[in-house]
Structures are given as structure tokens and as C-alpha cells.
């Protein structure tokens, strides 16, 4: 799943004994390999509609009672790493991951990670929207996100009163995710998700609970706020937080990365996102890169190609070609 063009397809299981086999194969191809079983002897029937926008996949799923398991045997270190956001639209579901279990009702949101085992149980006929997206699209450390997997985000409290209805309408209108503005709409949805996750993390782990974790979160928030500044460096970040550069390096090394690598990956991801945004279609690639603090065009181009496998110019031209073919 690359680029930014929109694509879609629909799968309906046949009314036959091998319907579940068809469903397993379709899900393994479109999502990730899963163990899937019928519940309560109800013959399986399912509807799967997928819309792909760049490297984000959106699914509308309607199915009879069943259980889904992502087991350790199905997970490989070589797999791409994705999060999945699930929005219940009809019927209940039970999500289990990372030692937590939560019951989801219509209107509820929850997030889980395809790179760790999970179980989803649907005891009744259900309908859900699922958004699957790479880890790197979330401006939060993986270990932070792992603290809020299998957590219910209801529509009746907190930010859920604002954010959940947006996802509900998105799920009901997936046919609108076409054309040049689809990428902007999808990424806006993911920004809302990150806002919700961040609020929950702040609520659970305030400064008094874990000062070290609070500092790490503050440092990352500071970096994201100043990402477009070309003079953003480990030294300037350390000074802004009254800590030593060595302490700053320790914060990031605990997660197996360096502060410089984290800054670079965040900048490149934001640049790639802007190159797919029709709002900046008439801006030079160098302007988009400079917007995120990378002003050396040759250096930026090498970084982008090393990260994404093609030059920024080739990436943008491919997007334009995809959109022209869709329009035709």
C-alpha cells in the first residue's frame, strides 16, 4: 500500500459451506493473516468493503457471529507494522490485547496493534469500520500506544463526544473517499485519533505518577511543535527542558532509537504527507521540505529515497499519474 491514490473493492461471501474459507483468504490478503471461527453454529456470512488511500486502508465489515485471533504464530518480525482502529457501528464486540479486555458497543472506538497477539469476539451480527495504518503515521512512541490498546473510547464522554461522531460519519460515507482530497481527509482523521490517545495517556500518567515518562512525552511534544525549525537540534531541545544532552539521548535510547533519527523520521513522514496533499500541489518539492526544516535539497532527496524507496519528485509524479488515470 503506497502512494496516495484511492482504490477500493468489495467482497461478499458466497452462500455456501466454504464461505468462511473465502473470508479467511480475503482477510489475509486485505488485512493480515488471522484465525477466524464461526460462533454458536451460525453459518458464516460476511461483507467486506475496502478503500485504500495511500498507505491507509479503510474497511467496512458486516458479518455473522465469529471470533478473530491474531496468534503469535501468525506474526513475523519481517511483517509490516500496523495499528488498527475499530469503530463499532452495530452489535457488540470484545477486544483483547496486552492483558486487557474491553467490550465495545456501537459508537465506541478502540485501537490495537497487528504486531502483537489479539482476539476479537463478535457474539452477534455486527457492523464495524476498521482503519489500518502504519505505525509511523502516529506521532507517539510505540510503548505509549501499547498502554492504550484494548481501551474503550466511548462517544458519550470527553473528546469522544466530538471525535467519535466524525469517525461514525466517515464509516457511513466511505464512498466519499475518492479523488485528490481523500488523503487529507484520512490524515485529518488520524490526527484526531492521536489527539484522543494523547489525552488518555495524559489522564492515566500525569507528572506525579511517572516524572520520567512525563518528561519524555513533553520532549516529543516540543519536537513536534518545532519540527519545521531548521535549527532544531539535540542541544536546543535539551536546553529548552533544562536537561543535559546526555539525558536527552538516554530518553530516546530506552526505546532503541536516537533523538536525531526520530526527528528525521517525523520530518520525512510529514513531508510525504504534504506531497500527497492537493493544498500544496503547486508548491515545489523543495518548499515542502523546507516547511519541515530540511532546506538542503540534495540531502533531503537522499534521505527521502532511503526512507521510502523513491525520490520525492518521483513520488509526487506517480501520485499525479494515479490521479489522472482515476479521473480518466
Image (spheres, rainbow, N blue to C red):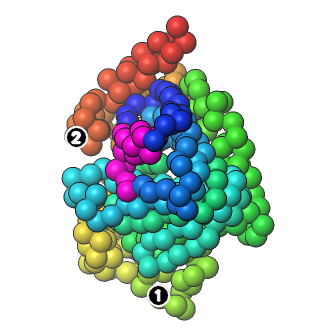
- Residue 99 image-quadrant placement: bottom left
Q: Is residue 151 above or below residue 297?
A: below
Element at label 1: helix
Cα–Cα span, label 1 and label 2: 36 Å
Q: Is residue 142 above or below residue 230?
A: below
| Residue drawn 37% across the image and 34% down it | 2
| Residue drawn 43% across the image and 23% down it | 319
Element at label 2: helix
Viewer-nearest residue: 146 or 20: 20
Q: Is residue 268 visible?
A: no
Which region of the structure is painted magenta?
18-35
Say if the magenta span includes residue 21.
Answer: yes
Instruction: Name the residue carrying label 1.
Output: 211
| Residue drawn 70% across the image and 49% down it | 168
Instruction: Name the residue carrying label 2.
Output: 306
How many other residues sit within 10 Å of disc 2, few (<14), some (14-19) or many (≥20)?
Answer: few
| Residue drawn 46% across the image and 30% down it | 4
Name the spot of residue 89 as percent of width and height, x first. Answer: 69, 52
In this rendering, position of residue 25 left or right of residue 228 = left
**Pointers 1 and 2 in contact (C-beta within 8 Å):** no
Say if the magenta span includes residue 230.
Answer: no
Amino acid at each position: 500500500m503506497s502512494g496516495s491514490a484511492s482504490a477500493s473493492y468489495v467482497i461478499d461471501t458466497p452462500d455456501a459451506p466454504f464461505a468462511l474459507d473465502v473470508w479467511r483468504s480475503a482477510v489475509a490478503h486485505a488485512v493480515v493473516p488471522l484465525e477466524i471461527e464461526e460462533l454458536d453454529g451460525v453459518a458464516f456470512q460476511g461483507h467486506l468493503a475496502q478503500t485504500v488511500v495511500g498507505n491507509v486502508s479503510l474497511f467496512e465489515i458486516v458479518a455473522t457471529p465469529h471470533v478473530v485471533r491474531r496468534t503469535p504464530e501468525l506474526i513475523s518480525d519481517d511483517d509490516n507494522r500496523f495499528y488498527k482502529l475499530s469503530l463499532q457501528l452495530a452489535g457488540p464486540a470484545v477486544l483483547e490485547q496486552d492483558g486487557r479486555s474491553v467490550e465495545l458497543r456501537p459508537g465506541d472506538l478502540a485501537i490495537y496493534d497487528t504486531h502483537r497477539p489479539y482476539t476479537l469476539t463478535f457474539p452477534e451480527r455486527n457492523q464495524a469500520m476498521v482503519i489500518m495504518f502504519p505505525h509511523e503515521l502516529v506521532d507517539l512512541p510505540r510503548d505509549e500506544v501499547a498502554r492504550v490498546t484494548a481501551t474503550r473510547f466511548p462517544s458519550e464522554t470527553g473528546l469522544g463526544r466530538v471525535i467519535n461522531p466524525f469517525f461514525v460519519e466517515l464509516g457511513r460515507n466511505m464512498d466519499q473517499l475518492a479523488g485528490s482530497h481523500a488523503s487529507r481527509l484520512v490524515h485529518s482523521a488520524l490526527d484526531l485519533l492521536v489527539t484522543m490517545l494523547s489525552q488518555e495517556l495524559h489522564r492515566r500518567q500525569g507528572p506525579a505518577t511517572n516524572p520520567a515518562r512525563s518528561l519524555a512525552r513533553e520532549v516529543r511534544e516540543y519536537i513536534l511543535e518545532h519540527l519545521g525549525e531548521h535549527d532544531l537540534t539535540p542541544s536546543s531541545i535539551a536546553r529548552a527542558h533544562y536537561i543535559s544532552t546526555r539525558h536527552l539521548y538516554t530518553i530516546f535510547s530506552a526505546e532503541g532509537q536516537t533523538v536525531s533519527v526520530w526527528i528525521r523520521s517525523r520530518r520525512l513522514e510529514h513531508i510525504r504527507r504534504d506531497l500527497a496533499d492537493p493544498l500544496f500541489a503547486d508548491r515545489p518539492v523543495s518548499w515542502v521540505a523546507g516547511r519541515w526544516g530540511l532546506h538542503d535539497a540534495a540531502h533531503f532527496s537522499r534521505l527521502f529515497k532511503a526512507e521510502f524507496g523513491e525520490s520525492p519528485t518521483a513520488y509526487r509524479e506517480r501520485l499525479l499519474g494515479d490521479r489522472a488515470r482515476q479521473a480518466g
